[in-house]
Image (tube, coloured by chain):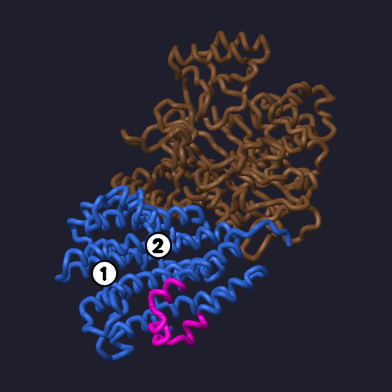
Amino acid sequence: MDFYNEMFDANGGVRAHYKGYENWLKETPHERIARKRAEADLAFHRVGITFAVYGEEAGKERLIPFDVIPRIIPSTEWKSLRSGLRQRVKALNMFLHDVYHDQEILKAGKIPAEQIINNAQFRPEMMGVDLPGQVYAHIAGVDIVRAGEGEFYVLEDNLRVPSGVSYMLEDRKMMMRLFPELFARHKVAPVQHYPDMLLEKLRAVAPKGVSDPTVVVLTPGAYNSAYFEHTFLAQQMGVELVEGRDLFVKDEVVYMRTTQGPRRVDVIYRRLDDDYMDPLAFRADSSLGVPGILKAYQAGNVTLSNAIGTGVADDKSIYPYVPDMIRFYLGEEPTLNNVPTYMCRKPDDLKYVLDNLAKLVVKEVHGAGGYGMLVGPASTKEQIEHFRQLLIAKPDGYIAQPTLALSNCPTFVEEGIAPRHLDLRPFVLSSGDCVDMVPGGLTRVALTKGSLVVNSSQGGGTKDTWVLED
Amino acid sequence: MLSRTADHLFWMSRYIERAENLARLLDVTWQMSLVPQSLDAINQSWAAIIALNSLEESFAAKYSTVNGENVLKFMVSDSDNFASIHSCLRLARENAHAVRGTLTTEMWETLNCTWLEAREKSFDQLFNAGIGEYFEWVKMRSSLTRGTTLGTLLQDDAYQFIRLGTLLERADNTARILDVKYHVLRPNGDEGATDFYEWGALLRSVSAFEVYRKVYRDVITPERVAELLIFNRDMPRSLHFCLNSVAKILDLIANSNSGETQRQGGMLNAQLRYGRIEDILEHGLHEWLTDFMDRIYLLGNGISKDFLMPMDQAA
């Protein structure tokens, strides 16, 4: 398979937007870069920018490897990505509003109704609930990969609790600290205003009639894998970081317990899945949530961000319908491509998938984080056979997609600099009609040679992402 | 601020202060044990440390005899003992971790590094290198934590709860050190000759040796040592200094439920402001200190109830 290289063209020439960087890389002694890399590792450790890995020793924290070669996106390419993202996220929010109200798209026969109603992520509790600005996914972390010149695909929409934005910000801070001269040579679009933008959006979706809303970040606690990010965002926005036990509901109003007595809370940026939010409404065994918060939410006394029930729009079984949503709600052709998807619940698709397992990527419909997936070309016979049994046993639990030729980018690895595959997660913020994002996003890179799985839980690293201004 | 955040900050500073005071107490006991005296007397002073912390049972479960090395091992680096210096440093770090967004980077890194370094030290290494050096290290890390707090943290409610934790813990510990040492040094309260070195060590354990000289410009007497540690308003480790600051902070952070706690804090402070050492000694120092520690404990409970773990009451 031929892969698109972000830095070099097919003839080995340096792409125009990488020329400046490549010159710098050639003239800079590698000892200096090696020293800087060690400095970065040390700094990340001391500050404690770590994440916990599930399944490893409890409480163990690991660094996400940081690569000092940036991923550079020229401004024209970014503009087209940005308009595609705006279009897509707008349509997804309209879809969510529709699904929880009149369900026009189901009546029009664009999506089979049972796909929605029987979906575990569909929340009947949300039917008829009106949200400020009709926005459900205030924060979306859309995963995009490139397969060729101008050829971008959306892999996943991530409308529940997407994470990673703190790495985007910390990576930039680190690059500017390690190699300030690079930023003097390039016009790199800034990203550090993300927390401001997020706070502005969260304030904009406060319940009606609240002029100076109190915003908080809700975390599952210090042992969550993304705890660093939760503290980081709360600190950067200057709002309280709360746990479920810090909140309580009285007369359908949410309060936090403060040293000056109860204080009303208006907007909750929650980093907790729907299931755990309210033991009275969802999982009764959840000690992380707030009893009664769903009622307060339904009454319109508090805004949850993202809304309850967004999972029905980023579910892998709904993903194939996103292009139709764009056509249906916006009357436009989609700018960003969807990856062709085989839905194993359909007998024809299942047969094709079973016959071509070695070529395909198979994913669990409800999976996330790179857990529970099969990358056919990179798997052993045993692994493929294992998935065949899983598929036969529960076909509607899986989808399959052709293995994309993910682009790669030069990356520091043990043997020197070598190409490694990467993706891009821009963070798209919505309030009302306004859909916004900082230029770029988080670039994740698969550090294992040939690997197409970039998730940090699977040993992926990150790179600073530069959008060059004209 | 969030009650839980205040709670973590309060305990973070209590634990680091506790580690420091424990280091001070163990250090002075260690130094006194080097002065020629009977083995019984030495072991008695070690046993007093265990008794002071009400750890007789858990100590006896691990060690058959009370002696310097066993008590040091138990109180310095035993991770099963929740009152050991090792545990205090771990708990200080854990509380800091839970609210690291509220701390400045410098504070978090100081507490985190303290724990990471403490974890690396085995008791045998510490003991062989000279245990005094370790006590110095603990004191220095505690000072560093206080210093970064003072030098970097916004002086809002978060700062006040950190100070409150430090001061309450310190008052309790100064009272304990005085209680246990005073009666070891003057078992019968008689007026016999006082040992300059032993009283000097006690003063040094609360960094008050030079202070004593400055304040009294005279020989060291037990009555004045007690007076200095209880009543001097300007010495940072005296009871009066601590309670004076506690009362001021309680006024600053007051809420609609905290009236009774403020009253108790103010009353304790008033007793220290207007009391006399002669009256205390007449009624018995030990009784007075026991009562004082009880009231400090109640004050801590009041603070916890009013600010750190309030019941659900919507305004």
Tell me where the magenta segment starts and ends, as one range. B269-291
Nearer the N terminus, badge 1 or badge 2? 2
Q: x, y (%) of residue B142?
A: 37, 65
Label 1: few (<14), some (14–19) or many (≥20) C-alpha neighbours in 10 Å: many
Query: Same chain for marks 1 and 2?
Result: yes
Q: Which mark is residue B28?
A: 1
Q: Determine the secondary structure under disc 2.
A: helix
Residue A375 lies left or right of residue A431; in this view the side is left
* Image position of A9 with respect to B30: above or below: above
Q: Determine whether A75 is above or below A283 in the image.
A: below
The answer to whether A381 is drawn above or below residue A86 in the figure is above
Closest to the observer, B108 or A423: B108
Question: Label 2 is found on which chain of the structure?
Answer: B
Amino acid beneath label 1: Val
Q: Is residue A206 toward the left or the right of residue A44 in the image?
A: right
Disc 1 sits on a residue from what chain?
Answer: B
Residue at image mark 2: B16
CA distance for labels 1 and 2: 19 Å
The residue at the far bottom in this view is B217
